[in-house]
Image (spheres, rainbow, N blue to C red):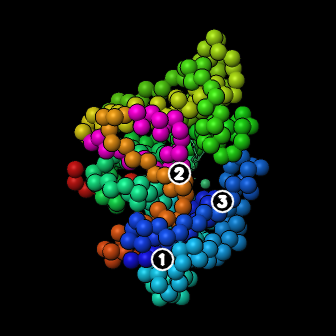
Amino acid sequence: MRIVGIETSCDECGVAVVEDGRRILSNVVATQIEFHKPYSGVVPEIASRKHVEWIADVYLKALDEAGVAQESLDAVAVVNRPGLVGALVVGVAFAKALAYGLGKPLVAVDHIKAHLYAPLMEFDIPYPFLGLLLSGGHTVIAEVRSYDEFRVLGTTIDDACGEAFDKVAKHYGWGYPGGVVIDRLARKGIPEACAFPDPSLHKGRHRYDVSYSGLKTAAIHQLDQFWNPEYPRTDENLAAAFQKAAIDMILRRLELAVEDTGIRRIVVGGGVAANSYLRNALGARSDWHVFFPSLPLCGDNGAMVAGIAYHYAREGKFAALDLDVHARVEAFKPYAGT
Ligand code: ATP
Ligand code: MG
Ligand code: FE
């Protein structure tokens, strides 16, 4: 089954053609980074306008690179949540027109579920596993029972992991996107230069939760309190210390989740999955079986959308042409059963 996947939830305009949920025939991602860079963050109206300008070209390029005719597509998949509403609307309207015009079914995809599906396109990973989703808008540890069944164990109570990277980098004028710049700066820094505290939420139902707002504030306003005076206060040292604190915080919760569930298979997804400190730290865990998406599948892309859509399509779970878009996530409603 050949599916086209469309992603316009934020600032990447992505279209991909994927066969049978895994075989990526093309994966075109047109990033708007340069248009949002002057604002050190995504400007929603610019995002929508660029998607509306680009979507048809990106679609045609994806067909061309895949070497397939659009008549040979079996379904049209699109992200309809979560994300910027004005950006989602562009992809969804385009997908509806395409599905209607081609006479093919439409599949609605949750962006967060798609992020955690990405590594399953590259590796054979049996369920259940612990999903670690770290992105610009979300931070989740979940027990994943199938491509569509998640039990949320932990989440952030305030800022998302990637958001914290972005906000700290923005404050210091390091560049955009913040995660990428901090990762680069941190390679030349000393993580021990600053010992940021880990908020102790880990009690009761908050056992697996994290809070990034406090870390962000500490990295911006409280360096005097936490800096080790033996080290110079350089951007590199600060980036390395912040990155270590941000990643270690979520890894400590993951460790608890592994202990409690007995599940040692970990699947990582989302833009922060590209982070080199995270990859090294998890890569060093020989007692766990950790799967990362390859770099092109960490950030937003259409391939993960077309990939997961295969499973919905196989089960006949199609969307109607009055499909709406939603800013908020649906992926992590607790499911029935244990
Ligand atoms: P969501 O997926 O929650 O809707 P999003 O789609 O905007 O949000 P992604 O595109 O998945 O998020 O990821 C973007 C985030 O990843 C940004 O916050 C960015 O700073 C972060 N990021 C990208 N590369 C790295 C890296 N190497 N280290 C840390 N963070 C990174
Ligand atoms: Mg993006
Ligand atoms: Fe994303």
Numbered mark located on residue 31 in the image: 3
User: Does the beta carbon of the residue at mark 2 sit less than 8 Å from ligand 1?
Assistant: no
Mark nearest the camera among 3 and 2 is 2
Q: Which mark is residue 88?
A: none
Q: CB of mark 2 within 8 Å of CB of mark 1?
A: no
Quadrant into which the N terminus falls:
bottom left
- Which residue is painted at 48% across and 26% down in the image? 198
State which mark lies toward you, 2 or 1: 2
Q: Is residue 216 above or below residue 137?
A: above
The amino acid type of the residue labelled 2 equals Leu
Residue type of the residue flagged with mark 3: Thr
Residues packed near mark 1 inside 10 Å, few (<14), some (14 to 19) or many (20 plus): many
- Residue 181 position within the rendered picture, expressed as x and y whole percent measured from the top left: 66, 40
Circle 1 sits on which residue? 76
Report if the CB atoms under discs 3 and 2 are less than 8 Å apart: no
Check disc 2 and report the residue beneath it: 295
Are there few (<14), some (14-19), or many (20+) residues within 10 Å of tag 3? some
Confirm or reject: label 3 Cβ below 8 Å from ligand 2.
yes
Between residue 325 and residue 103, name the one nearer to us.
103
Q: Position of residue 115 (x, y in %)?
A: 46, 56
Name which of mark 2 and mark 1 comes first in the sequence: 1
Q: Quadrant of residue 327?
A: bottom right
Q: CA distance from mark 1 to mark 3?
A: 21 Å
- In the image, residue 248 lies in the stretch drawn in magenta: no
272 magenta-colored: yes
Question: Which of the two discs, 1 and 3, labels the residue nearer the N terminus?
Answer: 3
**Could you tell whether 260 is left or right of 46 in the image?**
left
User: The magenta stretch spans which residues?
Assistant: 263-284
